């Protein structure tokens, strides 16, 4: 099993230049989790007070549900807190479980992705290998996301399959991250429903939490997956091309790619750099000759155009 090619920080940076990227903060990670839930709460309140804005609230909440998954990913790398126990509690109970995931199941799966990125053993290779596809194929995938079909397949059918077989390692990502956390997911979601019921807006759980979770969240997760690895030539042999970075406009960060998830090439080069330092890392790498080899897109629309260019 050949591992993905790697570079060392010393290949690019002096010890003094690299030192800022190694430092971990005890408070930024928890504040990001708080920020994510605050945005969800604000968008939910907007949808309750002004029902005409419910479609906007659904998009914002669905993107922040992806934000919870991104912060779970950060916790998988130990990035939410230098305190391992706090990191795992935040990453599991406040990030993973509410969207039907399990930090304990996701961490080994994701670290295998880093170890074998774009190799045959990469468990995420199935997400990028089919691309490019035709425009019709991409359109059908997005329609399945927005109509709840993807959610049902990944978060319901796979979960039952995992319970039946007891072999999570043989499942796709949807089962790996749900099969071990169904009870916790139901418990947390029951608490959300109870809280909204006590507030007199029981319907908001279904319209402003469950609906985004089953529609917008799967769609932006797909867009994120496509942007990260699809159609990057040389990704299996060059560490600078193991992933794509996408320059995201403010509206893309608000509705598609929160919490610096668009800086994915930098994350694959140095996976233990905290997510909030990735923009600075991007500038530092691009300022060196090797940085010219990185795959950098000018926005998610350009990525989707490339990913759907097959005739």
Image (cartoon, helix red, strand yellow):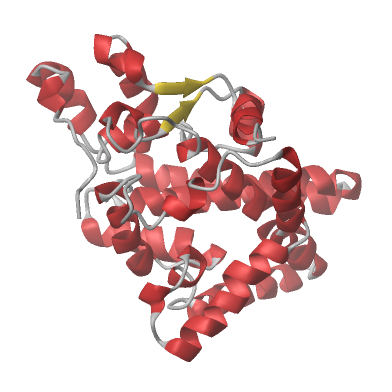
Between 29 and 4, the residue placed more toward the observer is 4
Between 125 and 60, the residue placed more toward the observer is 125
Q: Quadrant of residue 32?
A: top left
Residue 191 shows up from this direction: no
Left or right of 212? Residue 126 is: left
Give me the residue at 53% from left, 83% from top.
161
Residue sticking out furthest to the bottom: 164
As drawn, 120 above or below 166: above
Between 29 and 293, the residue placed more toward the observer is 293
Left or right of 269? Residue 294 is: right
Residue 65 percent across, percent down from the top left: 58, 53
Residue 21 percent across, percent down from the top left: 23, 28
As drawn, 167 above or below 263: below
Give me the residue at 82% from left, 46% from top.
55
Q: Quadrant of residue 257?
A: top right
Between 166 and 256, the residue placed more toward the observer is 166
Q: Quadrant of residue 72?
A: bottom left
Give me the residue at 87% from left, 46% from top.
50
Left or right of 141? Residue 10 is: left
Residue 52 shows up from this direction: yes
Q: Quadrant of the N terminus?
A: bottom left
Residue 272 percent across, percent down from the top left: 25, 40
Count the numbered circles shown.
0
Give me the residue at 81% from left, 50% from top.
47
Residue 77 percent across, percent down from the top left: 28, 50
Residue sticking out furthest to the front: 311
Residue sticking out furthest to the right: 52
Q: Quadrant of the C terminus?
A: top right
As drawn, 266 above or below 298: below
Left or right of 230? Residue 72 is: left
């Amino acid at each position: 099993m050949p591992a993905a090619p790697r570079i060392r920080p010393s290949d690019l940076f002096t010890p003094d230049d690299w030192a800022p990227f190694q430092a971990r903060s005890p408070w930024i990670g928890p504040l990001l989790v708080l920020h994510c839930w605050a945005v969800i709460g604000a968008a939910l309140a907007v949808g309750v007070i002004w029902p005409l804005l419910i479609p906007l609230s659904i998009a914002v909440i669905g993107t922040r549900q992806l934000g919870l998954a991104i912060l779970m990913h950060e916790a998988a790398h130990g990035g939410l807190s230098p305190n391992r126990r706090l990191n795992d509690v935040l990453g599991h109970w406040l990030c993973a479980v509410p969207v039907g995931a399990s930090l304990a199941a996701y961490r080994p799966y994701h670290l295998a992705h880093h170890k074998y990125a774009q190799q045959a053993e990469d468990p995420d290779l199935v997400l990028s290998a089919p691309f490019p596809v035709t425009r019709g194929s991409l359109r059908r995938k997005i329609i399945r996301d927005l109509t709840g079909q993807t959610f049902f397949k990944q978060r319901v059918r796979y979960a039952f399959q995992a319970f039946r077989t007891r072999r999570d390692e043989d499942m796709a990502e949807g089962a790996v991250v749900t099969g071990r956390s169904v009870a916790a997911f139901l418990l947390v979601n029951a608490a959300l429903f109870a809280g909204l019921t006590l507030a007199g807006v029981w319907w908001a759980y279904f319209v402003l939490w469950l609906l985004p979770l089953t529609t917008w969240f799967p769609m932006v997760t797909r867009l994120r997956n496509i942007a990260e690895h699809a159609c990057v030539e040389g990704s299996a042999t060059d560490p600078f091309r193991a992933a794509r970075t996408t320059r995201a406009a403010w509206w893309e960060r608000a509705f598609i790619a929160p919490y610096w998830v668009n800086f994915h090439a930098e994350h694959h080069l140095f996976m233990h750099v905290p997510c909030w330092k990735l923009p600075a890392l991007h500038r530092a790498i691009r300022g060196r000759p090797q940085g010219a080899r990185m795959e950098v897109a000018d926005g998610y629309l350009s990525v989707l155009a490339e990913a759907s260019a097959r005739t």
